[in-house]
Structures are given as structure tokens and as C-alpha cells.
Image (spheres, rainbow, N blue to C red):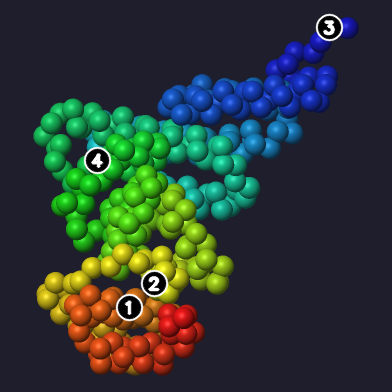
Amino acid sequence: MEAENPLHGAADGTDANTLARNFIHEAYKNMKETKPKEALLKLEQALRADYTQQEALYALKCLKWWMERIKNLDNAADACDPCSRGNFLLSQWKSYYGFLERVGNVYDGCQYAVKRFVYGLALRNYQAVLADGSMRHDPELLEQVGRCYKGMGRYEDALDYLKQAVRFKREDAAAISALADVYALLGETKAAKALFREAFFIGPQAVDLHNLESDLILELVRHVENMGYTGAELREWIPVYGAVLGVFTVKRELKPSEAGRLKQQIFDLESELRGSRKDEKILTPALLNRYFRLIDHYEGSGGGHALIDEIKLKIKIIKPVIFERYMC
């Protein structure tokens, strides 16, 4: 009897599964090469070979999600502007992660291919802007190019562009945390710890947790998540536990203007915390983060022992469990 067409299911279940797996592998290769239409055809072939193949179905949903966004982008008024196209693609990650939460299971191989596809497509647009020459020193463009290289696993290139961007964006927590992540991925732990600490001090809410990749920070994030913190609260507690668990250990003495600004922030947060308890879940870790920063400053300057003891007493009153862990 003639064997059944492999595109419509195989007689042997094992052969069908193997064929489907091969098609999935080819689809991922197409995605990494920014060839979404070819990847779509391969995934459809995988499902025709084995309709029970859950990874193929999952990958198909993910790819179609992005292809729908790209279709909308092609119909937009600024579709011909490469910088706008690149920015649009990178702006969709937050929505995509929300989509993944609804879908359920996560296949790492698929997500790696999706990242290579989207960041590769965005990079192609940004490279067209760089080729023009007029924006080659623009910090926003440099940061976006660096993020693309990081998402594609090209960490040395990412480091080059993100370092240039951060020179102009010294108060940008998102850019600094991306640079810190790249340093960690390259094994430059000291630089990574220093920069993560800066980013989570400057603006915890601006740090893009979804796109962090290094074990250095992900293990800390998971630890804080396992304590039940989520969302905005999670981001505020990360630097606190980074201090008490000995992750954010690379410190620097503050300039006089920075120290003065920090003391004012502490005063404002203390007043706000006394005046209203409704925002206590956010205000408490934000205040603790600044207490630790001020202690580090006093220790680095070699003075202020009485002031350090005063701050430690405040920590003990506000959050005894943090005080105990910090003093261990």
C-alpha cells in the first residue's frame, strides 16, 4: 500500500512527530532570518504532518500575533519612516508578554526565534537610519540599536551602542539596566552590579524586567517574586533585597549635590508615609532603598557613624525583617 502523503499525516505516529519537529525547526530558522511568511508555511506543514503537535500550534499563534501587528504597521501613516517602524516593533513587547500570559505554556525555542525575528526586523529599520548619517549620535537611536543587538544575542555590539547611549542618558533607568544586563551576560559582574544598582535607584518602574536575560538579575527577581510581590511593588522591592542579599555590592560615594538630593527625597517619602497609609506598599520599599543608599554614602565617605546608626534604627522601625536580614 502506498505511504500516505507526509503533509497530511503519516501512518506511523513517531514518523509524523519527527516530520513535524523538522518543520518546526525550519520555521524557527526562517524566523531568525526574518522570513515570517516562510516560517508560517513551515508551521502549517508541521500541523498537517501531526495535528497534535502543541509546539507548532503555539508557535503559529505567536507568529500570527506579530504578523498582524506588522500588517497594521504597514497600513500606518508613517509606514515609510524606518525609525518609526523600528520604534513601533519594540513598543509591542509589553502587549506581547500580556498575550503570552493568556496563551499559557511557553516554549523557549519559539520565544528565542521570535526575539531574533522581531529584533532583527527592527534592527534592519534602524540600520537604514544609521546609514543616512544624520542621526548616528542620537541617544534614543543608539539605545534602540543596542537593544536590538542584545535581543539577537550579539552582546559585544549591544555593549558598544548601549555604552554610547548611556553617556547621554545618565539618569535613564531603562537604558542603564539594559547596559547592566549586557555586562552581566558578558561576565563583567562588577560593572553589571554597579549599573543595576544605579538603575534600580534612579527609577525601578522604568526597568524592563521582561527583557532582562542575565542570571545575576533574574535570580534576584525570582527571589522577590517568590515572596509574593508583583507589578510596581515587585520593582520597588528588588533593590532592597539586592542590598540585603548582597547582590548590589558595588557602591560609590555620592557627590555633594547627589547626597543633598537623596536626603530631600528621604524627607519627602517619610512625610508622605506618615501622612497616608494607602500607598504604603510602594512608599516603604522606596524609602528603604534610599536609606541603604545613604548608609553606603556615609560608609564610603568614612564618617557619619552616628547618622548611620540613626538610619538603621529607622529601618528597624519601618521593616524589622529587613533590618534583621541586613544586619546578619
Place residue 269 in its image quadrant: bottom left
Local secondary structure at mark 2: helix
Camera-side residue: 250 or 45? 250
Q: Earlier in the sequence, mark 2 or mark 4?
A: 4
Local secondary structure at mark 4: helix
Question: Is residue 276 rendered to the left or right of residue 170?
Answer: right
Q: Earlier in the sequence, mark 3 or mark 2?
A: 3
Pointer 1: what residue? 292
Pointer 4: what residue? 160
Q: Residues at badges 4 and 1 in contact (C-beta under 8 Å)?
A: no
Question: Is residue 140 rendered to the left or right of residue 207?
Answer: left
Within 10 angstroms of label 2, few (less than 14), some, or many (20 or more) residues? many
Q: Residues at badges 2 and 1 in contact (C-beta under 8 Å)?
A: yes
Q: Position of residue 95 (x, y in %)?
A: 45, 50
Local secondary structure at mark 3: loop
Please tell me whether residue 28 is drawn above or below residue 138 in the rendered image: above
Pointer 2: what residue? 243
Please tell me whether residue 138 is drawn above or below residue 306 in the rendered image: above
Q: Is residue 10 visible?
A: yes
Name the amino acid type tagged 2: Ala
Q: Earlier in the sequence, mark 3 or mark 1?
A: 3
Which one is in front in this view, the residue at disc 3 or the one at disc 2? 2
